[in-house]
Amino acid sequence: MIEILEGTRETVSYSPHFRVRLYLNQETENYPIHWHPAAEVIMPLENIYTAVVIGERHVLNPGDIIVIPPGELHELFAPDSGKRIILQFDSAMLYQLEGFSSSLSLLGSSIVIRSGENNDLHASLKALLLRIMNEYFSDQPLKEAAAFSLLIQFFVQLGRNYVLGENRFPNTRSRKQHAYVEMFLEICAYINDHCTEDITIDHVAERAGFSKFHFIRLFKQFTGSSYYTYLNKRKIMHAEKLLMDPNITITEVAMKSGFVSLATFNRVFKSYKKCTPSQFKNLEGIHRTNP
């Protein structure tokens, strides 16, 4: 299935006019640790399938769905027989949609929607994924547009469930909760756009109209992480893109990503990606994790 693999970086081979790739994968081979700029969605149809994302092992049963954001190191392990949908797409197509980048960044290194849990969401996402597959392999006119519209629906439903489905702001009235969700989506988008700059927590709290103490508490309730943890994650995501350029040094990547020193960059990068920036850039020296 991996057509172009240099070290640990996979280059997804899209068609000239459609930056979505879908495989009805039945191969029994395992795929070693790798990453790609594409986002990835996997759903086994027959037999299990195992994904290890940054060292975290997920055994997927038929119908389970895993979403792996772009840039995450992962391995895939196949049984002796089976079938699964593997969908890869250029997430930049969706980043231009308001709120998408903020919602996707809240999902972490991966998210699993299991059959038998959150039945309404799972049934809806599974049906959409099967419809995407049917459109992708059809000979109907406008099949690319149809598949892309279904892909948007998939992530709208996933994002809304993740953002609104949990009681992120307990002890807050329903109307105010929705206002808080909208506000913090905007705040996350602002951080995403300005993560390489010196944006302090005081500045962002003032922008949100909260005291620093109140903002710290509400931000963690919304994102599940502290402000600086979220900010560092966005800096690392920015650094990943720069590391793809062979003409930029590690030190330049650190500075362009908003880190005050190379040592800090190396430490934070390794804590998130489980490898050093040099290993990530040079596509070597990353050791395989046994499932």
Image (cartoon, rainbow, N blue to C red):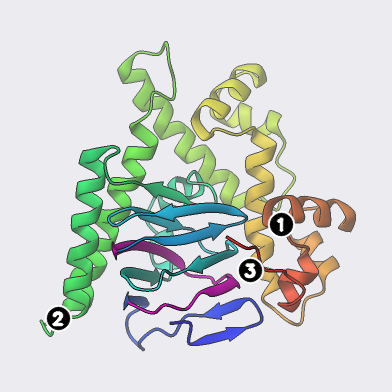
Q: Which residues are magenta?
A: 26-46
The 10 Å Cα crowd at callout 1, few under 14, some 14 to 19, many 20 or more, is some
> Which residue occupies the extreme left position in the image?
140
Instruction: Return the disc, 1 or 3, that comes first in the chain's sequence.
Output: 3
In the image, 163 versus 62, the foreground residue is 62
Left or right: 286 as drawn, with respect to 101: right
Based on the displayed image, in which of its 4 quarters is residue 71 positioned? bottom right
Q: Picture coordinates of residue 181 (x, y %)?
A: 41, 31
Based on the displayed image, in which of its 4 quarters is residue 179 positioned? top left
In the image, 157 versus 284, the foreground residue is 284
188 in the magenta segment: no
Q: Quadrant of the N terminus?
A: bottom left
36 in the magenta segment: yes
Q: Picture coordinates of residue 123 (x, y %)?
A: 20, 47
Residue flagged by tag 1: what amino acid is it? Lys
Q: Picture coordinates of residue 165 (x, y %)?
A: 33, 32
- The residue wearing badge 2 is 138
- As displayed, is residue 82 above or below residue 202? below
| Res. 99 in view | no
Label 1 SS = loop
Q: Which mark is residue 241?
A: 3
Question: In percent of the image, x 77 and y 65: which residue is there?
Answer: 277
Left or right: 193 as drawn, with respect to 283: left
Residue flagged by tag 3: what amino acid is it? Lys
| Res. 163 in view | yes
- The residue wearing badge 1 is 274
Instruction: Return the disc, 3 or 2, that comes first in the chain's sequence.
Output: 2
Question: In percent of the image, x 65 and y 17: which residue is there?
Answer: 213
Label 2 SS = loop
